[in-house]
Amino acid sequence: MNYQKLIIYDHIDLFKILNELKNELNFEILEFSKKDLSKLLSKNTENSLVITKKKTKEIDDQIVISDFPIQILKLLEKFNVELLKKKFNQQSEINIGDYKINLNSRELMFGKKKIKLTEKESGIILYLSKRKEPISIDELLENKQNLKPYENSIFIAYNRRFYSSVIEAEKLIHEDGGLESMHFEFTEWSHIIEPLKKAKGVKENWFFANSTHVVDLAFYIAGKPKIIKAFSKSGKLTWHDKTNFVGAGETEKGVLFSYISNWESAGRWGIELLTKKRRIYLKPMEDIHVQMKGSINIIKHEFDLSLDNNFKPGIYKQVEAFCADEKGRLLTIKDHMENSEIIYNYMVQ
């Protein structure tokens, strides 16, 4: 029979009493002394009660029994009540990766650390954790009103905004007196993507879920489109509606731009930024190459890459901005929905 366990820690008198009665009890009785503390801490106590004589700071979940004499029936009743409460709490706890959410206390827990959540915050986390399919542009916009209370407090993790290369490119643009024009490409390697085993909707949603990392960065640097003409057409891919994209326009900052992407041809991700003095290549986007005016040579531009070499590119600066509540480079869900409506939707129609 699978009995619930009573773990008696450093409480020899209580252990002796309960051990004498073990044949009459529906509990398995275990004893741990002070020298066994490390073993106790490594033990799974999910279906157990840890009982101590005095509060032990190393043990998170414990019942202190120090008042004697005590009637044995009252003691057993207390154990049963505490085990029921523990079971109820465990059924209210949901694992999300390395974290847990307690639906009763609305706490988000990571190891011994915990923070309080509002009802709406816990609801959003649960909703996202249960998603088996990616959210499409249409679905995001359909939930625009529901997301309104969080429009400036939820952020989209477009980490390329925080690349060291992007921050350096912005410095070069400033030195040259501003950006004049821009060209970008978001070609996806369909021959690599097609055989991938993905959940339903992932590949069908590839532009919105993946390619927009480039599109967002391009218009973050150059400004949002004021005028845009976009053209797209379908190809032979069975998993994505549009495969060939081209467009041009002018941003709110007066920067002329163009873009191209053909998922059934050759290409890659990349952004080219043109000032009056040079053309700056983010291709690959983690590096910078420069072509000076009047030269055909394209040379690598050296700059500090230590953060992006030691961490996933952009992540350190992104987390730093989030923790410091510096929203300048972060993308809010409000702006993401706006971009989805006036840029991304338009590019794939």
Image (spheres, rainbow, N blue to C red):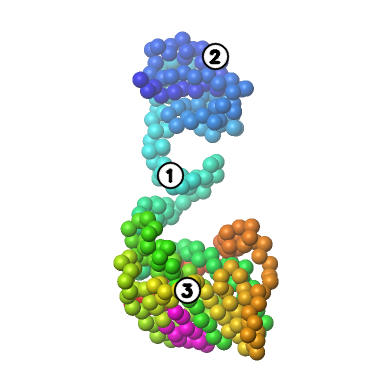
Q: Nearer the viewer, mark 1 or mark 3?
A: 3
What's the amino acid at mark 3?
Answer: Gly
Give me the C-alpha separation between circle 2 and circle 1.
38 Å
Label 2's element?
A: helix
* Mark 1 or mark 3, earlier in chain: 1
Label 3's element?
A: loop
**What residue sits right under mark 1 in the picture?**
95
**What residue sits right under mark 2 in the picture?**
13
Q: Does the magenta stretch include residue 257?
A: yes
Give me the C-alpha separation between circle 2 and circle 3.
76 Å
Residue 76 placed where, x, y %? 42, 20
Give residue 152's mark. Answer: none
Residue closer to the observer: 112 or 247: 247
Left or right: 112, with 20 as reference point = right
**What residue sits right under mark 3 in the picture?**
267
Left or right: 235, with 63 as reference point = left
